[in-house]
Amino acid sequence: MKRTDFWIKTSKTEQSAAEEPSKNARLLTRAGYVNRQMAGVYAYLPIGLRVLEKIKNIVRREMNAVGGAELVMSSLQPREVWQTTGRWDDEVVDVWFKTKLKDETEVGLAWSHEEAILQTVGRELTSYRDLPVSVYQFQTKLRNELRAKSGIMRGREFVMKDMYSMHTSEQDLADYYEKVKQAYGRVFEQLGLGQDTFVTFASGGAFTKFSHEYQTICDAGEDWLYLDRARNIAVNEEVLDDAVAELGLDKSKLEKVRSAEVGNIFNFGDAKARDMGVEFMGEDGQKHPLYLGSYGIGITRVMGVLAEKFSDERGLVWPAAVAPFQVYLVGIGEAGERQANELYTKFIQAGIEVLWDDRDARVGEKLADADLLGIPYRVVVSDKTLGQGKIELKSRTGEPELVAPDELLTFFASLL
Ligand code: ATP
Ligand code: MG
């Protein structure tokens, strides 16, 4: 894209902590990725959307690989569906936004979709031959969260990937659950969070005692994690004593760190289908409630965690896999601008994601933006280096080096 075609609004100064308490939101706002509409509600601007789409595509590939079929459920939810499990009740679920239709019918704004999926997909699976089925979506969830001080890490409106799998048996669900666990591992690896993300023992398993959360070490997180690094076991604070007893951990040796829940997976057993009366005809000719697994990833929260973890005093430092562009291209001087234009065309033809700063602006401003936006590589074409037949290449965190133009193309093509 050319910067003059692709609207980005960066800012020279950062908001104060009073204006915006969260680092990720201050940074992402300054760099023009998001715009705060109200507390806990952010718009994703063009360059921000590119990052979200990158994250979604990494997740999408892995969910497809475990046989998930993508759909999109509705945001408006009928009350009746949620009454079947008692989760319409505000005492049970305290994050509901509810509203009324013109005829006074009460409806809810979706904060999750377990019930809706069982109603929509589960009820169609009438025979054991129809199962297993796994469906997932990227959907904007609405939650009336009490506190929204963590920027995009805790939104009142946020994008979640939620997948639901339905099975004929406990064992089939358990096997699939393991497959998804592997897929999640690959997702966080690709997102550049593999090192710092732990599958943790959390409370609230409906079927087994524990559920599993994916927690990423992050100072801005809202959770505490207890790590036994040697055994590679991580436990959430809320189940610590239980887990220590059950897993035979030495409590005094556990390392306590701040973390953010970036995903979770949940085995509902057949409890939810039982509550809702969602049954299939088994091979035995009898009706049985189906088994449900639910698997979430906080897409916008992941983006917030990445911004928190990967930045320096000059701005963002995106891992290449989620960066909105791979190259930020700047031309200096008349010949430099002309060469930058030619290089831009070559990059585009080679399928390299390039943002060419073709604005009529000071060079210093362009270079500062390249850093602020956190693009992995910066290419500067100037009269000066062209005289030596070279172009300047610099990685976001490295030193500039001079390379020949065709070397440059080969280098970027090798990253594809
Ligand atoms: P939390 O304990 O952080 O409130 P949760 O247990 O309510 O999370 P789920 O309902 O299981 O979370 O949602 C699945 C995933 O969606 C979470 O693991 C998290 O990554 C993300 N998520 C949950 N609430 C929010 C929110 N308010 N803003 C952004 N992401 C969220
Ligand atoms: Mg919550």
Image (cartoon, rainbow, N blue to C red):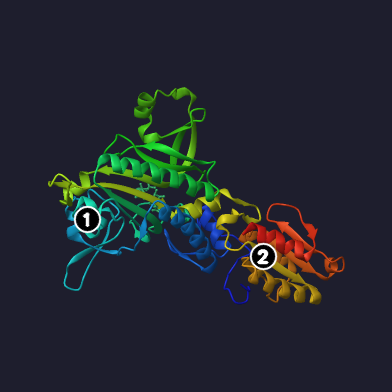
SS at mark 2 in the image: strand
Q: Which amino acid does label 2 sit on?
A: Tyr
Marks 2 and 1, how far apart in space? 50 Å
Task: Count up the numbered dots.
Answer: 2
Q: Which residue: 35% across, 44% down?
A: 176
The reply to whether residue 279 is in sight is yes
Residue, disc 1: 125
N-term-proximal mark, 2 vs 1:
1
| Mark 1 sits near ligand 1, with its Cβ under 8 Å away | no
Left or right, 324 with respect to 360, comes to left
Q: Where is residue 248 in the image (x, y as percent from the top left)?
A: 40, 23
Residue furthest to the left in view is: 286
- Which quadrant holds the N terminus? bottom right
SS at mark 1 in the image: loop
Front label number (2 vs 1)? 1
Q: Which residue: 55% across, 66% down?
A: 47
Q: Where is residue 225 in the image (x, y as percent from the top left)?
A: 45, 36
Q: Which amino acid does label 1 sit on?
A: Leu
Left or right, 211 with respect to 65, comes to left
Residue, disc 2: 328
The reply to whether residue 261 is in sight is no
